[in-house]
Image (spheres, helix red, strand yellow):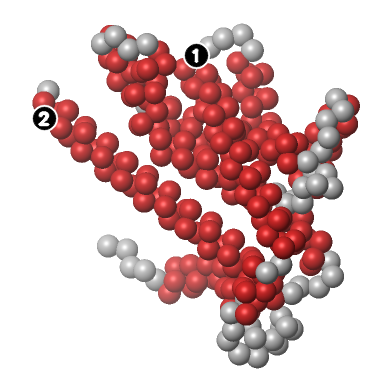
Amino acid sequence: MKRFSLFNATSLTLGFAFLYLPMIILVIYSFNESKLVTVWAGFSTKWYGELFRDQEFLDAAWVTVQVAVFSSTIATVLGTMAATVLVRAGRFRGRTLFSGMIYAPLVMPEVITGLSLLLLFIGIGLDRGIFTIVLAHTTFAMCYVSVVVSSRLTGFDQALEEAALDLGCSPFQAFRLVTLPIIAPAVISGWLLAFTLSLDDLVIASFTTGPSATTLPIKIFSAVRLGVSPEINALSTLMIAIVTIGVITASLVSKRAAVAQARDEQIAQRGA
């Protein structure tokens, strides 16, 4: 039996410290009484109150949430459709080109993606704003959704869907009633991944936004150039809390779905 050695404990501690120590410091200083972010003057939650009274931050947060919800939802639909075609269609002419074009945004520099979309919007005369940011975020997020859903569809037993077709379901009904519930954890994970990527994006949004739409990362970046304020620490702490709650919720949903699937398989085996 292998023991948890001192080397393993040290490596684990250093790894987690590298990942989470900056965020822990940020969270601690979000409760700092002093206006100077590097000087601790006692515990206080006043900067959270100041944050919720800052209308510019609230407007930027509302724009960011709208963009994240719409772009992640559209990206999830398109990414799931692309993954279904890639996994189910088998070999067809142009499959390699189609796969490469789906996954290309994963390795494409954000500056190139943002600049190309900017030139496209200018070329077709589309006014930049929330709509163009949603289109841009959908473009790069759908490939991440496609990767997540493809991995789940690869291990999916198609005999279940074929049984539904034999029982009279149409292909769409079989997908909606049989396939979609089984791959739901992957679809939810893909949506959350796309939502998080949209919340975090600064570069592509900078290229595709207009004067009427400022996202939260752009607002924070503009404010930090004049100096880090305790309000930004409070805002960052809230964003960390929201993402953490989302990840925990997705994990619980995935765990419950896995348990339910295992239970259904046991019942099916007993019935057979």
Which quarter shows the N terminus? bottom left
Q: Is residue 257 above or below residue 3?
A: above
Q: Position of residue 203 (x, y in %)?
A: 77, 48
Name the residue: 62% across, 80% down. Answer: 46
Name the residue: 79% across, 67% down. Answer: 224
Q: Is residue 78 above or below residue 72?
A: above
Q: Position of residue 226 (x, y in %)?
A: 84, 70
- Name the residue carrying label 1: 90
Q: Secondary structure at mark 1?
A: loop
Q: Nearer the viewer, residue 109 or 51?
A: 51
Which quarter shows the C terminus? top left
- Total numbered circles: 2
Q: Secondary structure at mark 2?
A: helix
Is residue 221 visible in the rendered structure shown here? yes
Closer mark to the observer between disc 2 and disc 1: 2
Q: Quadrant of residue 236?
A: bottom right
Left or right for 96, reference 110:
left
- Name the residue carrying label 2: 270
Q: Position of residue 99 (x, y in %)?
A: 61, 23
Q: Nearer the viewer, residue 29 or 132?
A: 132
Left or right for 80, reference 97:
left
Q: From mark 2 to mark 1, how far is it between C-alphas?
A: 33 Å
Q: Residues within 10 Å of mark 2 (few under 14, many from 20)?
A: few
Q: Amino acid at mark 1?
A: Gly
Name the residue: 48% across, 67% down. Answer: 12
Of the residues under marks 2 and 1, which one precedes in the sequence? 1
Q: Position of residue 33 (x, y in %)?
A: 65, 86
Q: Quadrant of residue 130?
A: top right
Q: Amino acid at mark 2?
A: Arg
Left or right for 64, reference 9:
right
Name the residue: 41% across, 39% down. Answer: 185
